[in-house]
């Protein structure tokens, strides 16, 4: 079974629109960590954020915000006022304390921001 | 810090040839990971090392794949003989401590086997 599900395969928005990328995870661990990575067209994987399971505070960083809800096992990512440079594939990932260093990546959401 | 450095960025080789991918982790990072990314399978963990010692190689697809980490600043992933289905982007990543701190990825090596 998929531990991390990103149901949205592709999303297109017009510049300046807000967009939310969904991430649902599955774990039995009480201690775990969630991540978002960005993969722009150039191909590198860029770390965006890390959250641990004990901190459900939402986080905002500029135009980016993350909504962590343990009740629904979700860790959604919102980009406000999207820009063309936000066009990329975004990956959600889970790391469980019991699984050592195994990262479970979602299949990614490809975001295209249309100018 | 220069980040995780991978070489080459692109590699095109003929089926049956040996391919060696290289990685220099971030200095001070004690974990090193090799991932493969394909459209069909997404990001797959191949192997990871802790303090130069291979810890989990269960993701290595078959005996044609091997990885070494002779010292803290260098690792190789070798495919011998290569096959067209090995075509993918191979990422190296490193981290300090356990993965809950997140990885730093290299820029990847795009391998094409013809």
Image: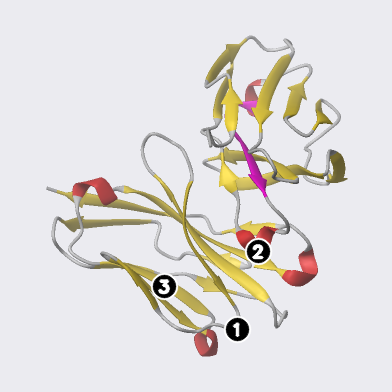
Residue B14 shown left or right of residue A115 in the figure: right
| Chain of residue at mark 1 | A
- Distance, label 2 to label 3, CA atoms, is 18 Å
Residue at numbered disc 2: B100
Q: Position of residue A91 (x, y in %)?
A: 48, 56
- Any magenta on residue B4? no
Residue at numbered disc 3: A76
Q: Is residue A96 above or below residue B7?
A: below
One can see residue A1 in this view: no
Magenta range is B86-95
Helix or strand or loop: what does disc 2 sit on? helix
In contact (CB < 8 Å): disc 2 and disc 3: no
Helix or strand or loop: what does disc 3 sit on? strand
- Residue B29 sits in which quadrant? top right
Instruction: Assess disc 2: are there few (<14), some (14-19) or many (≥20) residues with their C-alpha within 10 Å of its C-alpha.
Output: many
Query: Upstream in the sequence, badge 3 or badge 1?
Result: 1
One can see residue B108 in this view: yes
Quadrant of the snapshot with the N terminus of chain A: bottom right
| Chain of residue at mark 2 | B
| Chain of residue at mark 3 | A
Residue at (56%, 39%) from the top-left corner?
Answer: B38
Say which mark, if any, is on residue B40: none
For the residue pair A59 and A9, the one nearer the viewer reads as A59
Residue at numbered disc 1: A54
Q: Is residue A104 above or below residue A68?
A: above
In contact (CB < 8 Å): disc 3 and disc 1: no
Do callouts 1 and 2 point to residues on the same chain?
no
Q: Position of residue B62 (x, y in %)?
A: 82, 33
């Amino acid at each position: 079974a998929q531990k991390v599900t990103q149901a949205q395969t592709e999303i297109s928005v017009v510049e300046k629109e807000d967009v939310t990328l969904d991430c649902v995870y599955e774990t039995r661990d009480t201690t775990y960590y969630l991540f978002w990575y960005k993969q722009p067209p150039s191909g590198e994987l860029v770390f965006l954020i890390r959250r641990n399971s004990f901190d459900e505070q939402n986080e905002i960083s500029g135009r980016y915000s993350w909504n962590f809800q343990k009740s629904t096992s979700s860790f959604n990512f919102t980009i406000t006022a999207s820009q063309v440079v936000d066009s990329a594939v975004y990956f959600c990932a889970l790391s469980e304390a019991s699984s050592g260093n195994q990262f479970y990546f979602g299949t990614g959401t490809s975001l295209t921001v249309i100018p | 810090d220069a980040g995780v450095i991978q070489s080459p960025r692109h590699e095109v080789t003929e089926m049956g040839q040996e391919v060696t991918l290289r990685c220099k982790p971030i200095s001070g990072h004690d974990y090193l990971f090799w991932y493969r990314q394909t459209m069909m399978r997404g990001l797959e963990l191949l192997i990871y090392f802790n303090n130069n010692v291979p810890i989990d190689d269960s993701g290595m697809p078959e005996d044609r794949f091997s990885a070494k980490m002779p010292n803290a600043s260098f690792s190789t992933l070798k495919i011998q003989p290569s096959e067209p289905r090995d075509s993918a982007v191979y990422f190296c990543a490193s981290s300090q401590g356990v993965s809950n701190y997140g990885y730093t990825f290299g820029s990847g090596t795009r391998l094409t086997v013809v």
